[in-house]
Amino acid sequence: MWDVGGIRAVTVWSSRLLKRGLVAVMPGFIGPDMGFLLKPWAAFKKFTDKEIEVIAQKLSKKREKKKEKKDPLIRCSSCKNVITSVESVISVAGQHRHTFKNPAGIYYEIGCFSSAKGCFNMGEPTLEYTWFPGYTWCYSVCSKCFIHLGWFYQSNGSHFYGLILNRLTSAVSR
Ligand SMILES: [Zn+2]
């Protein structure tokens, strides 16, 4: 770690320390992903340890937000086929997550989704043992690898998917 104020600040949040540090101090040219340090003076300003810490925190928060925005897709954890997205997260009977036990005694934690284009529904819809009164269910499997992902629920005029959360890549909390 170089102990030269600005350069040190730039390098704190970089994995390729030396490379980015060098780019940052070249007058008139700053690297493409420098965030709010995209100001020529930033490279020459002396930062205190406290300031460096604050900058690093801000940048990592920014990065996390970007990541969330970038990947709203929820995939099959077995084959990575896109199943649904965070925009399809809904609440049914007051909540998104539900835990149910099937007649064989197996517990499932499912999340409710308004649509799931990566699912393929199969079997005859039935009301038998349904977890949502008034809704028939049939099986939903991944349209690519055919692993069982959950159930498709239907009632007069409305439908939704109840998908087994630990078989999807993204844990959705609500
Ligand atoms: Zn799959």
Image: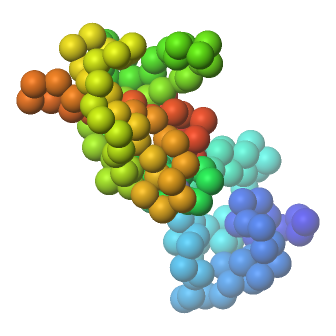
Residue 128 in view of the camera: yes
Residue 25 placement: quadrant? bottom right
Q: For this rendering, which residue is in front, 39 or 74?
A: 74
Q: Residue at x 72, y 78 (%)?
A: 20
Quadrant assignment for ligand 1: bottom right
Question: Which residue occupies the extreme left position in the image?
Answer: 157
On screen, 166 above or below 117? above
Residue 134 placement: quadrant? top left
Q: Residue at x 56, y 88 (%)?
A: 29
Q: Quadrant of the C terminus?
A: top left
On screen, 36 above or below 156? below
- Where residue 56 appears, x then y in whole percent? 68, 51
Q: For this rendering, which residue is in front, 150 or 66?
A: 150
- Where residue 99 appears, x then y in whole percent? 51, 16
- Where residue 89 appears, x then y in whole percent? 34, 35
Left or right, 38 with reference to 56: left
Residue 90 placement: quadrant? top left
- Where residue 159 appears, x then y in whole percent? 21, 32
Q: Quadrant of the N terminus?
A: bottom right
On screen, 150 above or below 55? above
Q: For this rendering, which residue is in front, 64 or 155?
A: 155
